[in-house]
Image (tube, rainbow, N blue to C red):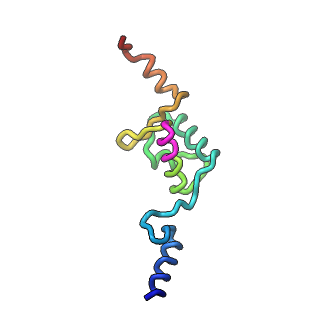
Amino acid sequence: MYNFISFVTDRLDDVGMAAGSKVPKVLHEPTLKTVMMVEKAILDSKDYPTRMQLWRSLPKQIQYQTFQRTLEYLEASGKIIFTDRTIVYTGINNPKLRALLDSSVKVS
């Protein structure tokens, strides 16, 4: 019985699962360069991209898990939000958001 349990936990470790957990281990953390590349790609897009469009438009290929962790970080830091299926950049240097705020009706 012990050998079977040991075999199963070893196999889970091999596929990226934490032993005794149903949560996958994070295999790749994004670097600052990766975060900046994704952020720039969002800013440079003409319209608001979906996750897959953004991932495919990146100048360098990154693993999808790293890409997802990057989007999680950007969302947690308040730089992006997800609306339906699209990604909207809400950082302070967003020209689209600035134009929208400038053209909006001011409430006193």
The residue most toward the top is 108
Please check the rendered image and state whether residue 73 is part of the magenta-colored stretch, yes or no.
yes
Residue 37 in picture, x, y percent from top left: 60, 43
Residue shown at the point (53%, 48%) measured from the top left: 70
Residue 64 in picture, x, y percent from top left: 51, 55
Q: Is residue 50 left or right of residue 91?
A: left
Q: Reply above or below: 57 against 21.
A: above
Residue shown at the point (51%, 63%) measured from the top left: 25
Residue 92 in picture, x, y percent from top left: 53, 28
> What secondary structure is the stretch in magenta mostly built from?
helix
Return the residue nearer the eye: 42 or 28. 28
Q: Reply above or below: 30 against 98.
A: below
Residue shown at the point (48%, 42%) measured from the top left: 76
Q: Is residue 59 left or right of residue 98?
A: right
Return the residue nearer the eye: 108 or 101. 108
The residue most toward the right is 33
Residue shown at the point (61%, 47%) measured from the top left: 34
Residues rendered magenta in the picture: 71-78
Return the residue nearer the eye: 7 or 85. 7
Return the residue nearer the eye: 61 or 34. 34
